[in-house]
Image (cartoon, helix red, strand yellow):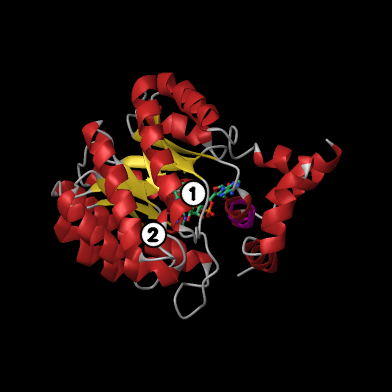
Amino acid sequence: MGIARSILLYASKNPWMRENLPNYPFARKAVRRFMPGEDVNAAIQAAHGFQPQGITAVLTYLGENVRDAKQADQVRKHYCDVLDLIAQAGIRCEVSVKLTQLGHDIDTEISLNNLSNVVEVAAKAGNYIWIDMEESRYVDSSLELYRKLHRQHANTGLCLQAYLYRTSEDLESLLPLNPGIRLVKGAYREPADRAFPRKSDVDSNFFKLSGRLIDALKGKSARVGFATHDQRLVDQIRQAADTAQVPRDAYEFQMLYGIRTELLRSLVRDGYSSRILISYGPAWFPWYMRRLAERPANVFFVVKNLWG
Ligand code: FDA
């Protein structure tokens, strides 16, 4: 792992920086590149703007590692309200949640109960809930929770990370459930005994896992989102899926707000389904550090903003 990436991922966990840096105007200005605003209405408005371009959306309220059950309950309520706002706005927009924001660190049952409530509200509105994947220490409990949840609620999908050695086995264990899978490379600092240290190995594993997901799509036994901005992987996946005669609208490419949106637009023009993940909320610091770490050259733009 590069030194810059390591430092940025270390910073993402630093309590002082998490508390204080977001108060600086330059930091608030810089984060705007990756989120339209802290308020949910800014996110809904942005999602609205993408609809005419054929790009659907998924909203996420930033925050993680909530250790107070009352606060986790407020997050549950917030997501229920957001589902109402989405229905009122009449937009094609789903929701993505973090289990640790719903109380997973306090007790996994708390996060399961909170999430089940959100998922029930979503089901009534004909909507769908994605579950983010966090650090590797949460993978076992996230899979266990997803198995329980998905048994009762088919309108749910889980993120899997290609940088983990274990993901191939995890995917095999989930496929019999007809799951929803969002495949990503992985954004956290992980040790070499759990995750491929070399980017080229992560990319190869992403493509290998994509092949398995394409098989599942052929059998119509999964809902799939390939979540990457990596043009080479996108091209390889398109080619493999086209060769396997999987219809272009049978799966999605998903990207983050502010990154490679032109690529998403070109995918829509070519007949592929595309979705943009729009984040919002005041607790953006750790998430923003992970975005900088993905491309340390981004730090240059932040520094430029100091004078901009
Ligand atoms: P890669 O990092 O190789 O980037 C490919 C190219 O995209 C770069 O060369 C650059 O041009 C551009 N790019 C990528 N990131 C950029 C950035 N931050 N700023 C500017 N340009 C950038 N992770 C996780 O661990 N758990 C999760 O739940 C999720 N959820 C999730 C949902 C969605 C919809 C997306 C798109 C991503 C996630 N991720 C995630 C993040 C994911 O793990 C990964 O860190 C990023 O997507 C970056 O990896 P790429 O696949 O884009 O490849």
Give the residue at x 57% y 52%: 287
Q: Above or below — where is 117 with respect to 201?
A: above
Decide if residue 50 is on the left or right side of residue 120.
Answer: right
Compute the Cα span from label 1 to label 2.
11 Å
Residue 46 visible in rendering:
yes
Residue 12 x/y as whole percent? 63, 60
Magenta part of the chain: 289-293
Q: Above or below — where is 203 with respect to 222?
A: below
What residue type is disc 2 on?
Phe
Give the label on residue 308, or none: none
- Mark 1 neighbour density, 10 Å: few (under 14) some (14–19) many (20 or more): few
Residue 61 x/y as whole percent? 49, 43
In the rendered picture of this protein, how many numbered marks are placed on residues?
2
- Mark 2 neighbour density, 10 Å: few (under 14) some (14–19) many (20 or more): many
Give the label on residue 206, or none: 2
Task: Name the residue carrying label 1.
Answer: 230
Residue 235 visible in rendering:
no
Residue 191 x/y as whole percent? 52, 77
Image quadrant of residue 124?
Answer: top left
- Seen from the viewer's position, the closer of residues 198 and 94 is 94
State whether label 2 is within 8 Å of ligand 1.
Answer: yes
**Magenta stretch: residue 290 in it?**
yes
Q: Above or below — where is 192 with respect to 136?
A: below
What residue type is disc 1 on?
Asp
- Quarter placement of the N terminus: bottom right
State whether label 1 is within 8 Å of ligand 1.
Answer: yes
Give the residue at x 34% y 59%: 110
- Seen from the viewer's position, the closer of residues 245 and 297 is 297
**Marks 1 and 2 in Cβ contact (< 8 Å):** yes
Decide if residue 206 is on the left or right side of residue 127.
Answer: right
- Quarter placement of the C terminus: top right
Q: Secondary structure at mark 1?
A: loop
